[in-house]
């Protein structure tokens, strides 16, 4: 698979899913399925990763405004697999934790989100940094 295909997919995926998650949190708070404290905790934990990824994607887009996206190197199967697998798992687990909090509230919701952001977010951040900052440096 070509590197630029992964970049385009992940750009749409990260921005789209994080906007959906943030919108989902607003709806849950509005309908009082999520307490104000849980809402604030979730937003304060999720926004830093979202804005960091958004900044990297935006920097890549700005830095490659004159470059053709068709010219791209082929990446290994394992690299492509991890590039798709980690973000998808991250989003599913994130939705699951938020949904679980609305059904059966956890006392340590913030810790669970923080753990998820740390364990998966750091690894995803390394991958995103590698993908989007390669050509812009």
Image: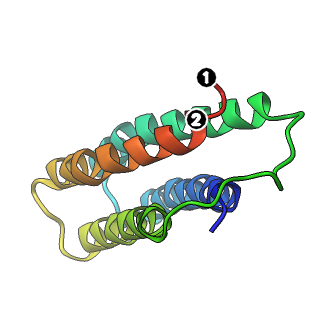
Q: Secondary structure at mark 2?
A: loop
Q: Quadrant of the C terminus?
A: top right
Q: Nearer the viewer, residue 46 or 25?
A: 46
Q: Secondary structure at mark 1?
A: loop
Q: Is residue 63 left or right of residue 109?
A: right
Give the residue displayed 36% in from the left and 37% down from the top: 44
Residue picked out by circle 1: 137
Q: Residue furthest bottom?
A: 103
Q: Is residue 45 left or right of residue 8?
A: left
Percent position (x, y) of residue 49?
Answer: 43, 40
Say which quarter of the image contains residue 118: top left
Q: Are marks 1 and 2 in contact (CB under 8 Å)?
A: yes
Disc number placed over residue 106 in the picture, else none: none
Say which quarter of the image contains residue 88: bottom left
**Label 1, label 2: how many angstroms apart (C-alpha)?**
6 Å
Percent position (x, y) of residue 40?
Answer: 35, 41
Residue picked out by circle 2: 134
Q: Is residue 109 left or right of residue 61?
A: left
Residue count near mark 1 (Cα–Cα under 10 Å), binned few <14, some 14–19, many ≥20: few
Give the residue displayed 69% in from the left and 55% down from the top: 4
């Amino acid at each position: 698979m070509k590197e630029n295909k992964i970049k385009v997919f992940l750009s749409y995926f990260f921005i789209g899913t994080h906007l959906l998650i943030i919108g989902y949190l607003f709806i849950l708070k509005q309908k009082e399925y999520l307490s104000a404290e849980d809402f604030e905790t979730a937003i304060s934990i999720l926004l830093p990763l979202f804005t960091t990824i958004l900044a990297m994607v935006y920097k890549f887009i700005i830095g490659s405004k004159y470059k053709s996206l068709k010219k791209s190197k082929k990446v290994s199967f394992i690299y492509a697999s991890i590039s798709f697998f980690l973000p998808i798992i991250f989003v599913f687990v994130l939705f699951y934790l938020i949904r679980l909090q609305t059904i059966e509230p956890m006392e340590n919701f913030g810790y669970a989100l923080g753990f998820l952001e740390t364990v998966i977010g750091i690894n995803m951040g390394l991958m995103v940094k590698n993908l989007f900052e390669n050509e812009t440096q």
